[in-house]
Image: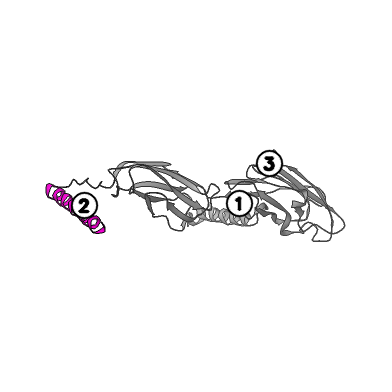
Amino acid sequence: MKKLIFLAPVFLLFILTQVGLANALTVRLNPSTVNLTTAGATFDIDVMVDDVTNLGGFQFDIGYAPAIVTVENASDVTLGPFLGSTGRTVTPVGPSIDNTAGKVTFGAFSFGVPAGPNGSGLLATIKFTVQSQTAGTLDLNNVTLTDINANPITVDVIGDTTLTAPAVTLAPTSLAFGNQAVGTTSSAQTVTLTNSGNAVLDITSITGSGDFAVTNTCGATLAAGASCSISVTFTPTAAGNRTGQITVTTNAASSPDTVALSGTGTGGPPVPPTTIPTLNEWGMIIFMGLISILALYMLKRRGA
């Protein structure tokens, strides 16, 4: 019984904590993850509020790395419908866009007779333009909420967005095979391909050029942080210095990525020996020559 009495407050505290977390007032960026594609592409980020009561106004900053994404125009920041959903008049404030520091600031306030909205909804939408396919974050900062009487509303949770992108790392970046007899195949050497980004790497092709043959264990995709092997052999088709490369084509920003290949062909194809006529062969040559001379002499005699 004493043990049950001791556990009861702990259990009650746990229940209250879970209820509190479930109803935490949250301002968040949606989606929470964006997989970046090519430079120049755009994507939308929604600023959402959850479990608010009597909302009268808001303001926020979103920080970003300008080398990765930018906000190009004021028209790329639009007001969501939630603040005015009860019929109050809404006035936007901003946006202020700084693509040097990497910050966009936006807000809005409302006035009128109706109460402010309760619950969850869309505060604003921001369109970002991709500058480079590089992993990063969008950071939601300086979030301010007020009720219709301009009293501050405490925000319990703020949610950011992670920007993901694949990245290719090849090691080593060159292979030297040394001397190899022409027409023979070397032992295999290995290059490791690693997806050093934080998004899935789509592999289009892995090819070799010149006198170098390539096989791999990579498949069509490679998970973030995963690695696979590329095996290379050298079969020189001629003597001398031979060069080629591995070319890896993917959805990474650096594609196509390459590894330099080199080797030296030695020996070459055998040279046919120079043949010298034997004595018997010389005799036959002289005999045939004499027959030819005699034939010419007989023809001249008849002609005379």
In the displayed structure image, the side of residue 25 where residue 280 appears, left or right:
left
Marks 1/2: CA distance?
85 Å
Residue 15 percent coordinates (x, y): 58, 57
The amino acid type of the residue labelled 1 equals Thr
Mark 1 closeness class: few <14, some 14–19, many ≥20 residues within 10 Å? some
The amino acid type of the residue labelled 3 equals Gly
- Residue depicted at 43% across the width and 41% down the height: 173
Q: Which residues are magenta?
A: 278-304
The amino acid type of the residue labelled 2 equals Ile
Check if residue 272 falls in the magenta segment: no
Q: Name the one closer to the observer, 239 or 75.
A: 239
Mark 2 closeness class: few <14, some 14–19, many ≥20 residues within 10 Å? few
Marks 3/1: CA distance?
20 Å
- Res. 38 mark: 1
Q: Name the one closer to the observer, 104 or 165.
A: 165
Check if residue 281 falls in the magenta segment: yes
- Residue depicted at 72% across the width and 59% down the height: 121
Task: In the rendered view, tell whether residue 97 sits above or below residue 206.
Answer: above
Nearest to viewer (mark 3 / mark 1): 1
In the displayed structure image, the side of residue 81 where residue 8 appears, left or right:
left
User: In the rendered structure, are the residues bearing label 3 and label 1 in contact, judged by CB atoms less than 8 Å apart?
Assistant: no
